[in-house]
Image (cartoon, rainbow, N blue to C red):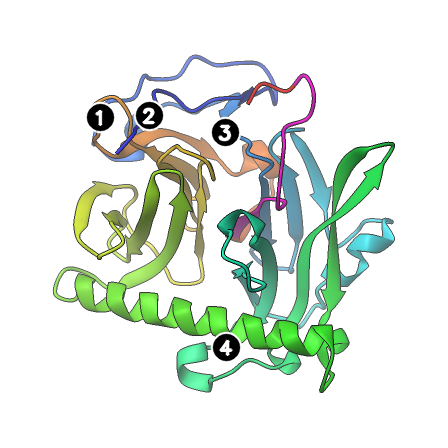
Amino acid sequence: MKKHSSILSALILGTSLIFTACGSDSKSDNNTQADPLELESDGKTLLFYGASTNEQYAYNVEKATLTDLNNNNDEDLTNFAMGANDNGKFVIWIDNKGDNNASNDEEKVVMFNKDYSYSDDGNATWKNFYYLGHYHAEVENGETHHHLAAHANEEFNVTSGAKFAAIGRLNAFLASEASTQSSLTNTLSGTTTLCGFKTVTNDNGTLHYAMGVNGTLYIYDDTFALEDSVSVTDSCEKNMMGISAVSHHDEDGVVVFEANSQKLYVVDSHDDDVFHVHTTYDVSKVLGSGKSAKMMTSLVPVGYEPEEGHEH
């Protein structure tokens, strides 16, 4: 399996600090604070869901910009707003619209009701989620621009048409995710309890990144054979974390968010083929001082190409 030699595209958020070189399998608190952030942007936007009052933020990695999804005058973002009594959880839906080209599959974020479970409740309906968000593509002067937008759940209260078909594809995806979750739960049985997972398919193949409640990240191949494991943090709580791919191309690794520590951990594998915590940084470096998050996920526009002049 091809391994990348570094995580690219350092993004300047402030004064740079020198950080410890990677190569240790020890927990991330042995790494110094990383600033600037080092992430392969890949068109990625990190989405954060607030810890106490339903704050929601979108951090554009390439542009190093933060958008408050609850308090924005852009009409495309209106439907992201969460009510004071809402309680949600992110699900990233990889929308396969029927062709055999995985590069055409579109990532969409669905903010489900926290209590909804496909395994327990069966097929989702519009009543089970608050909104569906994704990138809209617009062509202007021959150039494609992507902007984040959301659709309110009420738009899917239909019995035919494109949005009805979308709910069918969503449930097919949820069924597949439930099967993967069951396999990972059974695989981890006797070792730990599954806290959360992310399946990443890129040019190197498919890997399942499974986080245990013990704070250890387990990396499985597409047959659920264990490739590696790394101790990331002290513990993990379900629906209080998040995992995002470092890159959707040929790099292996993920960014892990854990709410109790309020830290992001870049876990990768390169020169020695051993997964390890490459670096760690506080969520406040992204969201700003005094802000916290409960969950994290990420979106990448379908067919993304880096902007001219951007190192990718």
Q: Looking at the picture, does residue 130 appear above or below residue 40?
A: below
Could you tell me how far apart the alpha carbons at marks 3 and 2 are, in whole angstroms? 19 Å
Secondary structure beneath label 4: loop
CB under 8 Å between discs 3 and 2 = no
Is any atom of residue 221 visible in this view?
A: yes
Which residue does the numbered mark 4 point to in the structure image?
115
Which of label 3 and label 2 is nearer to you? 3
As drawn, the label of residue 31 is 2
Sequence-wise first label, 3 or 1: 1
Q: Residue at x 36, y 56 (%)?
A: 197
As drawn, the label of residue 40 is 3
Q: Position of residue 41 (x, y in %)?
A: 55, 31
Crowd rating for badge 3 (residues with CA inside 10 Å; few <14, some 14–19, many 20+)? many
Q: Position of residue 202 (x, y in %)?
A: 41, 42
Which of label 2 and label 1 is nearer to you? 1
As drawn, the label of residue 24 is 1
Stretch in magenta: 296-309
Could you tell me how far apart the alpha carbons at marks 3 and 1 are, in whole angstroms? 21 Å
Sequence-wise first label, 3 or 2: 2
Secondary structure beneath label 1: loop
CB under 8 Å between discs 2 and 1 = yes
Q: Position of residue 290 (x, y in %)?
A: 60, 40
Q: Amino acid at mark 3?
A: Glu
